[in-house]
Amino acid sequence: MSSRLLASPEFGKRPPVRFVQLGRLAFRVNIRVLLLIGISALALVALAAWALTLGSFRLPLADVLGALTGSGTDDANFIVLDLRLPRVLVALMIGPMLAMSGAIFQGLVRNPLVSPDIIGINAGAALFAVFWIVTGRSLQWLPIVAFIGAVVAAMSIYILSWQGNISAARLILVGIGMNAVFSAGTSLLIIRADINDASRAVLWQAGSVYASTWSDVRVLLTTLIILVPSGIGLMWALRVVQLGDMTARSVGMPLERTRLALILVGCGFSAVAVSIAGPIGFVALMIPHLARMIAGPIGGGVLVFAGILGALLVLGSDMIGQHALPVTLPVGVITAALGAPYFLFLLYRMNTQL
C-alpha cells in the first residue's frame, strides 16, 4: 500500500472497529454501535424504573428498589412484584422481539417497507391464535400455535412470490394480499364465536400487555435466549444475502437454506410476541429503519441496538396509554398512532406509489 494512500483522509482516522479474538473465535466490535447500545440500555433502565413508580397507587423510587431487593413492605412487594414488574418485563421483551423480526425480514427482502405486520406474518399468527382462543383450547400452547401460523403465512407468501427468484415488490404485494385474507379469516372466526370467547379474542387483537404474568415472562425470556444468539449468528449471512443471489452463491452460501433459517428465526420472534401480547403494529416497521439510520448497516450489534429501541418504544407507548391520556388505551393503539404517519413518511421518501 502506497504512502500516499496511507496519508489520504480515508486512512487518516482509525475506524471505530476493533478485532477481538478469544481462542479460535474472532469477531469485530464496532465501538460506536457498542456505545449506542450502552446509552440506550441506560435509558431503558431509567424508563423501566419510572414505569414501576407510576399507577393509581404511586410509589417512590426508594420503595420500588426496596421491593426489588427484598426489603420492601408487603404492599410495595405486591404492587411491584405481582402487578407492575411482569407487565414492564413483558413490554421490555415484546419490543425487541418485534424489532428484531422486522430487521430480519427487511434485510431479507432488502426493503424498509417490509415488516411482519405489513406482509401478513403477524396476521397468519393471529389467525391460528384466534382459532385456538375461540375454540376454548389450552392457552399454554398458544405460542407454538402462533408460531405455526406465522411459518405457514411466511411459506405461503414465499411460494406465491417465487417466479425463479424473489422480487421485493412482488413479495410486498403478495404479502399485503395474504394479510387481507388472514385478517378476513380472523374476523370470520370472531363473528361466529361465542360472545365470551369473541370478547377475549377482540381484546387480544388490540395488542396489549395488560394482565401480564410471570408465566408470560418465562415464555418470552426462553424465546429470547434461544433466538437472539441465532439471529446474531445469521447477521453475516443476511448481509451476504442482501448483495444478491449471484453473489451469495458465488461465495458458496446455501442460499435457500439460509433464507429458510432467517425466516424461521424472524417468524419465531414475531409469533411468540404476538401470542403473548397480540398483534402490536408498526414496531417491526419503524424500529429497524430507525436503528439503521442511527447506527449503520445491519449487523449483530445493530440488531441488538434495534431490540433496545423496540423495548423503549413498546414500554414508552404502554406508559402513554396508561398514564398520559384521559382514557386507558392498549399499547397497540399507541404504536399504530405513531407508526401510520411514519409509514406514510417512508412511502414519501421512497417515492412509492400504491
Image (tube, helix red, strand yellow):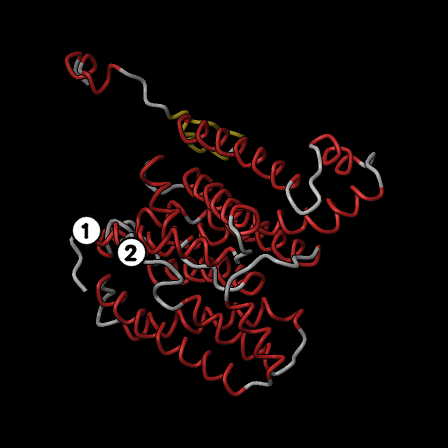
The reply to whether residue 223 is in sight is: yes
Amino acid carrying mark 1 in the image: Met
Q: Is residue 46 left or right of residue 117?
A: right
* Residue shown at 65% from the left, 81% from the top: 136
Q: Are marks 1 and 2 in contact (CB under 8 Å)?
A: yes
- Give SS at disc 1: helix
**Residue named by callout 2:** 113
Quarter of the view holding residue 68: top right
Tell me: residue 236, above or below residue 208: above
Q: Quadrant of residue 159?
A: bottom left
Q: In x, y percent, where is residue 219?
A: 64, 58
**Relative height, residue 271 to residue 40 (above, below):** below
Residue beneath the point at 57% across and 50% down = 322
In the picture, the quarter occupied by the N terminus is: top left
- Between residues 36 and 339, which one lies in front from this camera angle? 339
Question: To which residue does mark 1 refer?
Answer: 350
Q: Residue at x 30, y 48 (%)?
A: 240
Q: Is residue 126 above or below residue 107?
A: below
